[in-house]
């Protein structure tokens, strides 16, 4: 079943497996779009990124617009305000992510809110307006995500630094 | 427009619309002491550089009527398609505003051009003024860390919507431990793609406790991975099988080993990320035959998997006694051995063939991978008919082709049936390019994809099942 099919299927999802897949799919899209936003990319999601399953938004070239389709707008506004100093500096982020991104989730069986946690490591560089790279230290993060019961929307999320 | 007196700098603004006037205003403010001329032509952007005909003539006229340019002009312009080529070789200093970082590279090879990411003409003007020495601007600090900004932006803890720490109970799959950084090209999209290749682990089937117990009941389990024909995934199968056997016995404090006996084409090195300096099979055999204790082997990323690579130098074969000595040494150290052998039928006609025969004699189970290629399938039947293999349990990983016409071809099914009737237990493994990708990225083949892992887990289970348990009271 495609993710689109899963998302349309909504509450009558039969299997936990489908809910796991949908959770993974939307968490993928969220991290992908956040990274694309910080990279200031103005491209649609390339076809080779097959893991991006939100077909309805992948053609949008602005990652922020893609996010707006499935992320709580209040949270997106909060993030936008927080990132203003970064964007005001005309900077971008070149992301170098780690090999592993274990994903855990709770609430899949209950049919209600699902909470997922994606852990990842990165050693990225911020790039200033002249293209000069400013390497950032290697860090590990947990992206915690609260999903609506139908797994179509990200109701809340937060990025938490983990001790390395 | 132009300040009085002899200007030390001439700025030509080719930005369009309101950005042009904003930049001009910023430049003129800075040039109030007469050091700056600002020119704002009636036709701007790329058209200024390429205009011909009446438009070109009008521009020429505008240029003649403007204040004479006595210094090399500094041109402010916005990026558009075709601009990089148009700037090549022009006698001016160009500053180009680009909307995206990836466009900086378009101008990297132009000696007369600098590019910067900005959508604000005032900032471009300030930077150009500073770079030209007209005004001094403090060197900008490195940009703020956006991920930290996001982390700091978490809703307040008192908010009912505030994220709360997750409990670790009822989680999906293994947490996976600390992720390791993979060096690679710093391309966001590619890196994210790589990252999410790994998200298949969400439903990664964990190896059962029983599989580990079953391996220990057969300790030492020796699997010889052989083939009559090359290109059937023999080494990949050996590496995956060894990794999974190691994973299965890890919780019991035991290890598995991958032994590269492929003396003609040693390549276990490339299939697993090996830490540390690796002692080769040839060195170990040499030390054993001299009565010396070999050093510990290197371990792959899976900590319960030791890797014994073969020397990359061409070498002679091994005498059966040397293989016995090596096997005896390894059997007491590892719960399972997976031996990757040359593409030869076992015999004593050549060093390769003799090595295959010697290791098969040590093995409790023989693994013969195949594709749907009839030559490969026939190679399996040939192998099954050899004296060395006869009577031993045989498992055949069958790389299932993606093309349905091949999968359903009667000829293929007939040959598979022949293999089954000759005693080969066929286990289907999907044909997945990610197996090759794992090789390219030097990552574990067992982590390359969910279906691939499931196929190899089934293979490992069948291999363990096929091997005879150790009689009670032994071990």
Image (cartoon, coloured by chain):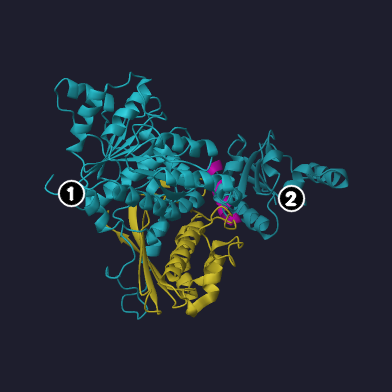
Chain colours: A yellow, B cyan
B67 and B384: which one is in front?
B384
Residue B427 in the image, given as x and y percentages of width and height: 42, 50
Tell me which residue sits at (30%, 60%) in the image: B175
Give the left or right position of residue B264, taking residue B210 as reference: right
- In the displayed structure, B143 sits above or below A112; it is above
Q: Earlier in the sequence, mark 2 or mark 1?
A: 2
Question: Is B256 placed left or right of A10 in the picture?
Answer: left
Q: Which residues are magenta?
A: B119-132
Residue at 28 percent across and 55 percent down: it is: B177
Label for residue B128?
Answer: none
Of badges 2 and 1, the one in the foreground is: 1
* Residue density around tag 2, few if under 14, some if 14–19, many if 20 or more, within 10 Å: many
Magenta stretch: residue A15 in it? no
Residue B269 at what x, y percent from top left?
Answer: 35, 34
| Identity of the residue drawn at 49% across and 46% down | B416
Q: Secondary structure at mark 1?
A: loop
Q: Chain of mark 1?
A: B
Residue depicted at 52% across the width and 35% down the height: B375
Residue B296 visible, this orientation: no
Q: Given the image, what chain letter belongs to the residue carrying mark 2?
A: B
| Helix, strand or loop for the magenta stretch, by majority | helix
Is residue B125 in the magenta section? Answer: yes
Question: Which quadrant is home to the C terminus of chain B?
Answer: top left
When asked about the image quadrant of residue B239, the answer is: top left
Judging depth in this view, the residue of B73 and B154 nearest the camera is B154
Q: What x and y, as percent, mark residue B130?
A: 53, 46
x then y, percent, for residue B220: 21, 42
Mark 2 → mark 1, Cα distance in angstroms: 74 Å
Residue carrying label 2: B44
**Is residue A52 visible to the viewer in this orientation of the structure?**
yes
| Residue labelled with disc 1 | B253
């Amino acid at each position: 079943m495609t993710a689109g099919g899963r998302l349309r299927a909504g509450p009558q999802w039969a299997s936990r497996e489908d809910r796991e897949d949908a959770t993974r799919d939307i968490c993928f899209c969220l991290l992908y779009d956040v990274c694309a936003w910080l990279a200031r990319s103005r491209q649609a999601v390339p076809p080779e990124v097959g893991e991006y399953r939100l077909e309805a938004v992948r053609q949008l070239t602005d990652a922020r617009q893609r996010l707006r389709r499935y992320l709580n707008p209040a949270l997106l506004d909060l993030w936008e305000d927080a990132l203003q100093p970064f964007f005001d500096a005309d900077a971008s982020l070149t992301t170098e992510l780690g090999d592993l991104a274990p994903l855990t989730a709770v609430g899949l069986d209950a049919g209600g809110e699902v909470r997922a946690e994606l852990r990842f490591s990165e050693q990225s560089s911020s790039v200033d307006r002249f293209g000069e790279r400013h390497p950032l230290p290697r860090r590990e993060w947990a992206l915690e995500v609260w999903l609506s019961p139908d797994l179509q929307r990200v109701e809340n999320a937060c990025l938490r630094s983990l001790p390395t | 427009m132009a300040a009085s007196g002899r200007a030390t700098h001439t700025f030509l603004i080719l930005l369009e619309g309101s950005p042009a006037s904003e930049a001009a205003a910023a430049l003129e403010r800075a040039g109030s002491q007469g050091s700056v001329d600002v020119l704002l032509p009636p036709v701007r952007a790329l058209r200024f550089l390429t205009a011909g005909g009446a438009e070109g003539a009008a521009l020429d006229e505008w240029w003649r009527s403007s204040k004479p340019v006595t210094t090399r002009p500094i041109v402010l312009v916005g990026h558009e398609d075709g601009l990089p080529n148009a700037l090549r070789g022009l006698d001016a200093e160009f500053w180009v505003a680009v909307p995206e970082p990836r466009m900086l590279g378009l101008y990297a090879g132009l000696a007369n051009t600098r590019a910067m990411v900005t959508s604000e003409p005032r900032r471009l003007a300030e930077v150009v003024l500073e770079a030209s020495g007209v005004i001094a601007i403090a060197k900008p600090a490195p940009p703020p860390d956006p991920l930290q900004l996001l982390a700091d932006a978490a809703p307040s803890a008192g908010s009912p919507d505030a994220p709360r720490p997750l409990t670790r109970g009822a989680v999906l799959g293994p947490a996976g431990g600390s992720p390791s950084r993979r060096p690679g090209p710093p391309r966001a999209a590619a890196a994210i793609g790589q990252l999410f290749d790994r998200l298949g682990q969400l439903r990664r089937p964990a190896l059962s406790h029983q599989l580990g117990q079953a391996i220990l009941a057969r300790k030492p389990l020796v699997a010889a991975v052989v083939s009559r024909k090359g290109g059937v995934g023999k080494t990949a199968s050996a590496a995956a099988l060894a990794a999974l056997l190691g994973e299965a016995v890890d919780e019991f404090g035991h290890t598995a080993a991958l032994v590269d006996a492929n003396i003609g084409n040693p390549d276990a090195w490339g299939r697993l990320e090996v830490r540390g300096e690796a002692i080769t099979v040839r060195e170990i055999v040499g030390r054993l035959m001299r009565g010396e204790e070999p050093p510990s082997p290197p371990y792959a990323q899976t900590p319960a998997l030791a890797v014994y690579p073969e020397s990359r130098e061409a070498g002679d074969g091994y005498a059966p006694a040397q293989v016995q000595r090596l096997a005896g040494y390894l059997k007491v150290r590892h719960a399972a051995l997976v031996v990757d052998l040359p593409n030869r039928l076992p015999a004593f006609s050549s060093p390769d063939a003799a090595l295959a025969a010697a290791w098969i004699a040590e093995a409790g189970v023989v693994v013969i991978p195949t594709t749907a290629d009839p030559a490969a399938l026939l190679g399996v039947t040939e192998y099954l008919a050899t004296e060395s293999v006869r009577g031993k349990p045989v498992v055949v990983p069958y790389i299932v082709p993606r093309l349905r016409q091949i999968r359903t071809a009667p000829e293929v099914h007939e040959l598979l049936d022949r293999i089954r009737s000759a005693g080969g237990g066929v286990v289907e493994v999907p044909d997945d390019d990610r197996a090759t990708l794992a090789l390219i990225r030097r990552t574990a083949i067992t982590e390359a994809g969910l279906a691939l892992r499931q196929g190899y887990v089934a293979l490992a289970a069948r291999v363990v099942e096929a091997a005879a348990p150790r009689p009670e009271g032994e071990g």
